[in-house]
Amino acid sequence: MDLIFTSILISFASIVIIPLLPLQFKKGFAIISVIASGILNGLTALRVLWGVPLKYSFNANFFFGEVILRINNLSAFFILITTFTLITGICYGYFYMKQYDNEVEKQSLHWSFYILLQISMLLVCITDNIIAFIFVWELMTISAFILIIYEFEKKSVIKAGLNYFIQSHLSVLLLIVGFLWLWTKTGATDFYTIAEIIKANPQEIGPLPFMILATGFAFKAGFIPLHTWLPWAHPAAPSHISGVMSGIIIKMGIFGIFKIIPFYQGNILSMGRLILIISVFTALYGVILAIIQHNLKKLLAYHSIENIGIIGMGIGIGMIGIGLNNSYIALAGFSGALLHTFNHSLFKSLLFFTAGSVYRKTHILDIDELGGLIKKMPWTAGFFLIAALAITGLPPFNGFISEFLIYNSLYSGMLGSNLSLSMIFLCSIFGLVMVGGLAFLCFTKAFGIIFLGVERSALPQDCSEVEKAALIPQFFIILFIIAIGILPYPFVKIVTSVAATFINYPLDESFIKLINTMSDISAASLFIITLTIVVYLLKLMAGRNHRERTSPTWGCGYTNPTPKLQYTATSFVSSYTRIASPLLKISIKTSEIKEYFPVKGWFHSSSYDKIEEKLIDKNLKRIGSIMRIFGFLQNGLIQYYILYGMFFIIAIIGYTFREAIVKFILSSLAIG
Amino acid sequence: MLTIILALVTGIFFTGIIIRVKSLTSGRKGPDILQPLRDILRNLKKGSVYSETTSFIFKIAPSIYFSTIVASLFFIPFGTHKALISFDWDFVFLFYMLAMGKFLMVIASLDTGSSFEGMGASREAFFSMLIEPAMFMIMGSFAILTGHTSFSDIFSKLHNGSYPITMTYAISILSALIVMLIGMVENSRMPVDDPKTHLELTMIHEVMILDNSGFDLGLIMSASILKFTLFGAIAANLFLLPEKSLLINIAIYFAVQIFYAAFIGLTESFMARFRMKKNPQFIYTITAATLLIFIAAIHSTGFIGGN
């Protein structure tokens, strides 16, 4: 615990120091601070994963009561994830923010709040007092908000930021209601004690507090239909913040759900089933919308929703496994979810970083206008490709391992349960396969259109690869992506040790078999890699006798192709769009061609989230029309506002002394 | 090891048979059965011409595509003879690995910046997305039926007598048919796509590889033959009998593969290619038919009556 306190101390000191430093040192100092406290946190977390859990308690004040800081396997795992992404995020952000180097004050605020985000995320992971938890959660939300609205002069940014702010506070509201409910019912403020009390008498509390809390956390994580803030906030934020947000901040919602699983003692089977079904729909909906996006960062944001769905599937299956008393299914499900959380934080942050590099160099985020970037930015393209392969879940990269674990639990669930559950598992498998296929379509499109072919619009002259140093943090992410993909054994072992804390049964043989499967997978992966190398070498040998020739792309007889003839992102997925059209809302505007010799024509298509339209926009309009009745109250005259305040105070006083007043009136009536 | 040898032997004559059947039904004599092999060998010896637009993706993609397909043959057992690579749920790995190769091919064709190849890439990505669930359903059904989870275990336990042989054979026939259809969709053959038309607007796979030449083209051509034998081998495994001798099983294996090649040849002779718009429906139908296998599987394990 001493290390953790030192790290918090370092961070707080840097928050004070950073605004005082000149600009060129601000960023460097922030990086040092984040890395230093990150290393301290990471070391503590590793020690917990290898040894005994840490616990520290102190009596804060009358309001919080006894605050317990506890690092168990789960929190240690999440500390590691957040630490890694925060460090790579700030190292990348150092270069990304170069384009804003003239804004000194804004940068002070930005870097200070980045460090505050680090502290608050650490505290969210380790705080075990429900009241204090709400506070640190709120701290995290606010610091993320400040980071998102860096470019607050832009109307779209501030709008997206406020959207995030309001929806996160809906989540906070639900958390407050849920936690206060538990507090009043059990009288305890410690997560662990509450879980013990609920376990002792499960009937008394019921499933409702769990559902409220889970909904609150689901807001943060972005399960449908609570996801609508996410596709707006991610494109609005600077790229390193988008990476951090998608990589770890939304994962805190997942952490929260994991943390409150012990609070649920009812019919865990049906709850798991519910979570599984919602997650399948989340994953499908996310990827279905991702495909039709034109804005690269928005596309990635929808993919975050998809991946949250996959993680949620793991959690749902895990809970079903507990309900079935089947430790194998439970363990495979939970481990899959945890590993996917880690994996997603890796490849999604990398995707956002590369998208940021593309934006930095081209100032374009519209996929349809990019093209041919692989020649100008080969490293960025390579990183994007590996991350895209990983997120699609293809071997030998890390996304495959976690999806394999989830498939494993789904198929095992299908083998060893009753008919109705089997059907649900079957549909989930179907859903997961579809998600994989759709992600395939989406990322062949994203990579192919952005980086391959020739430029579709004029790019800036100085469009070139980013600095070598900016590639280093991305290298580290790649290292993990490949390491987990090829040597999954140690990583799966760690996540199973975390997942095992949720399961009360001894780990049976079948599970050891699953872990051993991981070594088989790495053997198979290595086999493919060697085979590919051999084939490629053969090709090089065969090519030795021939001079390599180049020529223009074969145009099927058409001799004067222009870049405009290439496939665009829209046309690449047009057959998909036709099939999925009932689920989508696409508006197309185009100029009609009337003359025989047409003048310049144009075509514009844009898409909108159907759930957002039906659920949020419509209801907002409704609420707005009701609220407008009270519009006269807000007349801009300060005297009136003071008057309202006075009325309110009188009403409060009146309510407090209502009995005395009633008595007084009655007695005066009696006298009368 | 046995499967690899058998698959390679099958690969030598597979496309030859298809072409022979097609020419016989149209009243021609047709080329030698080994002609496709010679074509490939000739391509392998040639040098390549690369488009100026392309990058390293275009150069490595065919090698990766080819090796994923060769590697996938190592997962397929021969009846009770275990495959070289075998672990629980290995079919998930196999299908994802095939998708990996396909991913590279799709982006490689976008790499050329050609509108024709873009079209092929778009269709290939779209149809492979649609066909993906079918194989997962079939293998899932067989996992339920046999209670085992890897290719080797599933195929060695399929006809071991825990269920009446007529029933497992009935399921096998249906599944084999669907596996063959999936193989045809995966390989972009009739009725989904006609590899022999030279109207670029109508093609899927062939139009994707317009710019590949020389060694790369040879790799792609041999990969697509091996892909046929892969699906043929999966189908053949459904019929192998554990109690019969090795020779009989090898005979069954070749019978299935030859039937498959002839089936493709006959389909291509007597059927017209579907309109592009109709293809998704056809693929959905295949996927829906896999549900029949699933229902048959849970029915025979007593799931329906039981719980």
Image (cartoon, coloured by chain):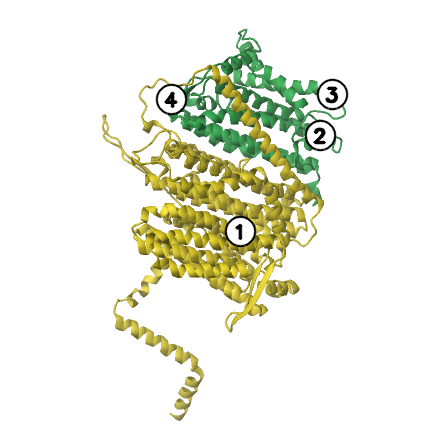
Chain colours: A yellow, B green
Q: Is residue A289 above or below residue A626?
A: above
* Residue lying at the far top of the rendered structure: B29
Residue B156 shows which numbered tag?
2
> Mark 1, mark 4: which one is toward the viewer?
1
Looking at the figure, which quarter contains the C terminus of chain A? Answer: bottom left
User: Which amino acid, by three-letter code, is at mark 4?
Assistant: Thr
Q: Are marks 1 and 4 in contact (CB under 8 Å)?
A: no
- Given the image, on which type of amino acid does mark 2 rest? Ser
Q: Secondary structure at mark 4?
A: loop
> Which element type, helix, strand or loop, lies under badge 3?
helix
Q: What residue is shown at x 41% (from left), y 55% (from top)?
A: A114
Q: Are marks 3 and 1 on the same chain?
A: no
Disc 3 target residue:
B246
Which of discs 2 and 4 lies nearer the camera? The answer is 4
Label 1 and label 4: CA atoms lie apart by 48 Å
**Disc 1 element:** helix
Dot placed on the residue nearer the N-terminal end, 3 or 2: 2
Q: Give, as a three-letter code, the residue at label 3.
A: Leu
Q: CA distance from mark 4 to mark 3?
A: 51 Å
Residue linked to disc 4: A553
Q: Is residue A413 left or right of residue A553?
A: right
Residue B37: x, y in percent? 55, 14
Q: Position of residue A347 (x, y in %)?
A: 48, 42
Label 1 resides on the chain identified as A
Circles 2 and 1, Cβ within 8 Å, touching? The answer is: no
Which disc, if any, is residue A80?
1
